[in-house]
Amino acid sequence: PEAITIQELANRMAERAVDVIKLLMKQGQMLKINDVIDADTAELIAEEMGHTVKRVSEADVEEGLFATEDEAGTLKARPPVVTIMGHVDHGKTSLLDAIRKSKVVTGEAGGITQHIGAYQVDQDGQKITFIDTPGHAAFSQMRARGAKSTDIVILVVAADDGVMPQTKEAIAHAKAAEAPIIVAINKIDKPGADPNRVRTELLSEELVVESMGGDIIDVEVSALNGTNLDKLLEMILLQSEVLELQANPDRTAEGVVIEAQLDRGRGPVATVLVQKGTLKPGDILVAGSEWGRVRAMLDENGEQVKEAGPSKPVEVLGFQGTPAAGDMVAVVENEARAREITDYRQRQIREKASVVASAARGSLEQMMM
Ligand code: GDP
Ligand code: MG
């Protein structure tokens, strides 16, 4: 149920909290400034103090934010977005780094490649986006927030170790996200490497690779030596062709926050994966309970980009506060709209927190009696 603190109610009416407390007292309720009252009580108080009440719901505030479906004719092919998952030490980071080193086109600035949480490579003139925050926790956190951030999961399995607990976990995550899996059998350079054992073990997880009559693509790689990286990228492109990935680039942008932090010099910095539309400097965007006006967008080379279309990851400067990984992003028409949405969401967060706090106080008081 909806609830509000006395302070918040007073703020919204531009009244003094003490007057609200007095009114409640007259009605026999002894409450303090941070106590929570339900929406019905709040409405009565507001009316008694001569205010008109308009209850606003999440749906009202966010109407139209993510609502529009794109018509078929507006859709154009977009690059696949790939996440690498697998058991610890099987080579996720090494593989991401190897691909980045051999494939990220270094920019004019001279290739001061920086970590922005995601990067894009060029394979035979086609782009592939890699999310550079491996970790099952990050993946499921994003999914829990309703963001579908990945088209294809690369499952890394070390050829000298085989299927391990986190391999199984990764498979479960990929299946839950309905993202197709490509198996990268890594460390084939190692003396004890046994790729066929990996293939056999994957059978028990209901992943049947092509050589065993199934439809799961597998590629033997060595992140250490750079073996078969091209082949892996080609397989990703092949898989993405099957998926027919599309988005409308000619609309206001939507996307998801891949990661964000507060930078000492630059303020809040968020890596945003654009999923629909095209993001441009000057756009006003909302991400979770934060908003900002895009001051600059940087790519993985630290170079400014003037626009970012579907599947493009960019570092966005200009947020007022730091959003959270997994927050959905949408461009809105103006600052007032951005404030309306984020004020509402921040209020929701505060109110939830104070409901929890006052419940805790309540039970503490009970315990002391
Ligand atoms: P992660 O935990 O999955 O990110 O694994 P890392 O990328 O950190 O790799 C774990 C260890 O395996 C490191 O010592 C890497 O150098 C090593 N490693 C990764 N890929 C290969 C490979 O292809 N061959 C060999 N021999 N070692 C590798
Ligand atoms: Mg790692």
Image (tube, rainbow, N blue to C red):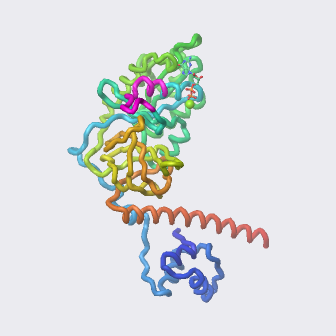
Image spot of residue 123 (x, y percent) = 34, 25
Residue 215 is at least partly visible in this image: no
Image spot of residue 88 (x, y percent) = 59, 29
In the image, is residue 105 part of the stretch drawn in magenta? yes
Task: Find the magenta span and give its range.
Answer: 97-112
Residue that protrudes farthest toward the bottom in the picture = 26
Q: Give the residue drawn at x 45%, y 36%.
A: 131
- The residue nearer to you, when weighing 281 against 79, is 281
Quarter holding the C terminus? bottom right
Q: Give the residue drawn at x 31%, y 42%.
A: 309
Q: Give the residue drawn at x 34%, y 54%.
A: 283
Q: Give the residue drawn at x 30%, y 46%.
A: 278
Q: Quadrant of residue 292?
A: bottom left
- The residue nearer to you, when weighing 178 against 236, is 236
Q: Is residue 106 above or below residue 297?
A: above
- The residue nearer to you, when weighing 98 against 138, is 98
Q: Is residue 367 left or right of residue 45?
A: right
Q: Is residue 341 above or below residue 241?
A: below
Image spot of residue 187 (x, y percent) = 53, 18
Q: Quadrant of ligand 2?
A: top right
Q: Quadrant of residue 90?
A: top right
Residue that protrudes farthest toward the right in the picture = 369
